[in-house]
Amino acid sequence: MSIFTHDFKTTPYWWEAARPSDDMAEPLPEQTEVAVVGSGYSGLSCALELARSGINVTVIEQNEIGWGASSRNGGMLSTEPKFANPDELRRKFGAQTTERILEDGRATFDNLTEVVEREGIECHLERNGRFVGAHAPKAMRSLEAKARELETDGVEGFELISRERLHEVTESDYYYGGLLSNDGGCLHPGLYQQGLVKACKRHGVRMCAQTQVKQLERDLDGFTVHTTKGVVRANEVVIGTNGYTSSTTPWHQRRLVPLGSYIIATEELPVEHVESMFRNFCTMSNTQRILFYYRPSSDHRRVVFGGRASFRETDALTSSQQLYEYLCQVFPSLKGTRITHGWSGNVAFTFDHLPHMGMHEGMHYCMGCNGSGVQMMSFLGRQIALKIQGKTNRPCGFDDIPFSTRPFYRGDPSWVLPALGNWYRLRDRFERLLA
Ligand SMILES: Cc1cc2nc3c(=O)[nH]c(=O)nc-3n(C[C@H](O)[C@H](O)[C@H](O)COP(=O)(O)OP(=O)(O)OC[C@H]3O[C@@H](n4cnc5c(N)ncnc54)[C@H](O)[C@@H]3O)c2cc1C
């Protein structure tokens, strides 16, 4: 039996409710105060904040508005974003910057909630907690150590779940226990993206779809933005291209490692079945180096399951088959369930695993979501807008921290990623075999 339904689609499941479109697109103007390149969460959040203050903004997008990762992701959120170890950050950036990074990291969830409520965006924002499963006993010991650290830091709202108690959280037997915490949530990424587009339009943002920025020239009075649909003059430019950053901005390209992430969605299931996999409909991921992330769909009728199906460019059918295998390893009760959608999108990793915002050659940018950008890129886009207007009391924690690259790296990781990815996957498998 085929694992695919007869009407299987290689477009995101989220697009059934909110498909990126050119409906609201307009022609390129001759002049704009701020030109924003990219129409994802970062570009739109920046544009919205500027337009709310009456600033003339033009968003320029090479595809349909909202075509990038922002309408393709898993929609998983966390009130406690994970960054590198705080002690490591302190060693690198000093105490003050580290405190800002941690403080701003925590502010990202509240920022998202505030915008969603203020703009009346109906995107099924839920706060149902999250579970991180330990793929091996060693990984469980690391989670135990993390739990002790959290306790020492006075963090509340988490619980270690032993292997014996796993069925209180999920019907799966895949894990050696895990960490359940209150701090997780999720939303419908497509509806959130669409809500931002509508909010931008209400506040007068001009959207130019199917318009690729080819070249950016700076002079004494601002910028000339050369696009496939002509030229626009701008006082300020904001780059929000994340995993789709290209040689149009080579400095940024050299600092990002773009990587494909893949997702599948199952056909509809009984709600009780979904609840038996996800207690309280929480989101889930695991401790593997090449991790899976998964959640119930917003109507709690499907499983949406994502991961790094491949480290080479691959087609949706092949990646979906691979993910389906992983899905059935975690939830054997889904064997025989078919999948309706399988798709992919690009994320952007950085060499220090931190997201970055700042200014280079007079242009503002925010990028480097490292796989977790729903709330982060929304926050950073807004921070750029506040910075442009001089409305911030202090620099954002992620602003102008060193944004490093590596010698000889030009932005194409395809020669090293397959080997590295397979090595990590092998280690994950070996640890499970050993267990
Ligand atoms: C499959 C997948 C699953 C994910 N799951 C999660 C998750 O569960 N939780 C989470 O927090 N994050 C997740 N992420 C990450 C998150 O989606 C991204 O961090 C976020 O959407 C990035 O937003 P952005 O606006 O910076 O970039 P994007 O949304 O990618 O937008 C960039 C846009 O720039 C446009 N562009 C690029 N170059 C040009 C040019 N020269 N001219 C004009 N336009 C240009 C592109 O077409 C694109 O539309 C996931 C990502 C993917 C791909």
Image (spheres, helix red, strand yellow):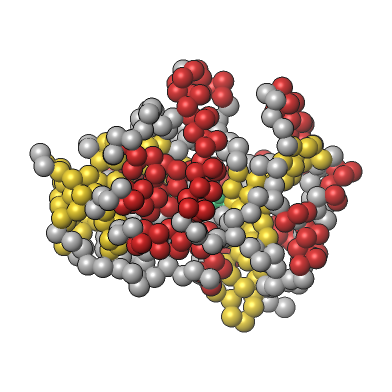
Residue 91 seen by the camera: yes
Check the image and name the residue furthest to the right.
164
Residue 5 point in image, percent of width and height: 64, 78
Residue at figure coordinates x 39%, y 45% from the top left: 381
Residue 281 point in image, percent of width and height: 72, 56
Q: Quadrant of the N terminus?
A: bottom right
Tally of marks: 0
Residue at figure coordinates x 85%, y 51% from the top left: 167
Task: Tell me: residue 93, above or below residue 131.
Answer: above
Check the image and name the residue furthest to the bottom.
6
Name the foreground residue: 322 vs 102.
102
Q: Quadrant of the C terminus?
A: top right
Residue 261 seen by the camera: no
Task: Tell me: residue 1, above or below residue 71.
Answer: below
Answer left or right for 39 relative to 354. left
Answer left or right for 148 relative to 360. right
Residue at figure coordinates x 59%, y 80% from the top left: 7
Answer left or right for 182 relative to 399. right
Task: Tell me: residue 18, above or below residue 162.
Answer: below
Name the foreground residue: 215 vs 284.
284
Residue 409 point in image, percent of width and height: 36, 38
Residue 186 point in image, percent of width and height: 61, 53
Name the foreground residue: 173 vs 300.
300
